Image (spheres, helix red, strand yellow):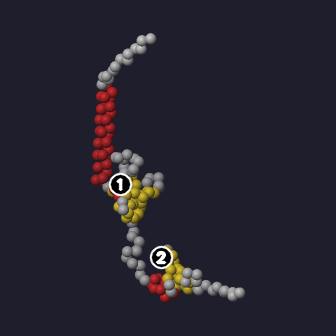
């Protein structure tokens, strides 16, 4: 019966370890934090030498203070949050990663996140004032309705 002796080919190139995977017949290495593979050692070295494309370079995003109108916090309730990064484009639009005052993170659409600035703070205050007026008017309406005389019908007595 033939015996097989395995020898692993490993090369360190520009500080990156490249290993030959005999089973899949590829060279494997980690480049910029991602697992990569190449069909030849030369191709692996070319990948390593190739400059990072502008489209791949990480975009820096400064955390930004914002207002979030939560799904379950009422139509006119706004919560102060921190936008930590842009999540992704999807069929629903662009999403943002936000963090609330308790440190909880969630991915939310831009339709519900508003810049935290003086102009928006004034608008939110106006919304709160109008919402209070609406609630007061609804309460007055309810009190007026409750004060109206009800139509009453006397029940006929059963004769036994």
Q: Residue at x 40, y 47 (%)?
A: 73
- For label 2, the residue is 32
Q: Nearer the viewer, residue 157 or 143?
A: 157
SS type, badge 1: helix
User: Which residue, as the protein is rendered here, is positioned at the far front?
Assistant: 160
Disc ID at residue 148: none
Query: In the visual, does 151 lie left or right of 48?
Result: left
Residue 148 lies, with reference to residue 58, above or below; the image says: above
Query: In the visual, does 122 lie left or right of 8?
Result: left
Residue 47, percent from left and from top: 46, 83
SS type, badge 2: loop
On the question of residue 19 being in view, the answer is no
Neighbour tally class for label 1: few under 14, some 14-19, many 20 plus, Cα within 10 Å: some
Q: Residue at x 49, y 74 (%)?
A: 33
Residue 85, percent from left and from top: 40, 63
- For label 1, the residue is 112
Q: Earlier in the sequence, mark 2 or mark 1?
A: 2
Q: Nearer the viewer, residue 147 or 154?
A: 154
**The N terminus sits in image quarter:** bottom right
Cα–Cα gap, marks 2 and 1: 34 Å
Q: Residue at x 69, y 87 (%)?
A: 3
């Amino acid at each position: 019966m033939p015996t097989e002796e395995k020898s692993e080919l490993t090369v360190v190139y520009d500080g990156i370890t490249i290993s030959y995977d005999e089973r899949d017949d590829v060279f494997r290495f980690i480049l910029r934090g991602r697992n990569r593979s190449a069909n030849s050692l030369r191709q692996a070295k070319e990948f390593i030498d190739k400059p990072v494309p502008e489209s791949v370079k990480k975009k820096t995003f400064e955390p930004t203070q914002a207002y979030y109108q939560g799904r379950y916090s009422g139509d006119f309730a706004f919560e102060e949050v921190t936008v930590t990064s842009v999540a992704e484009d999807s069929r629903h639009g662009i999403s943002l990663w936000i963090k609330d005052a308790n440190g909880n993170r969630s991915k939310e659409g831009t339709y519900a996140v508003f810049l935290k600035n003086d102009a928006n703070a004034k608008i939110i205050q106006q919304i709160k004032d109008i919402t209070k007026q609406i609630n007061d008017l609804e309460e007055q309406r309810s009190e007026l309705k409750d004060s109206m005389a009800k139509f009453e019908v006397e029940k006929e007595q059963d004769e036994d």
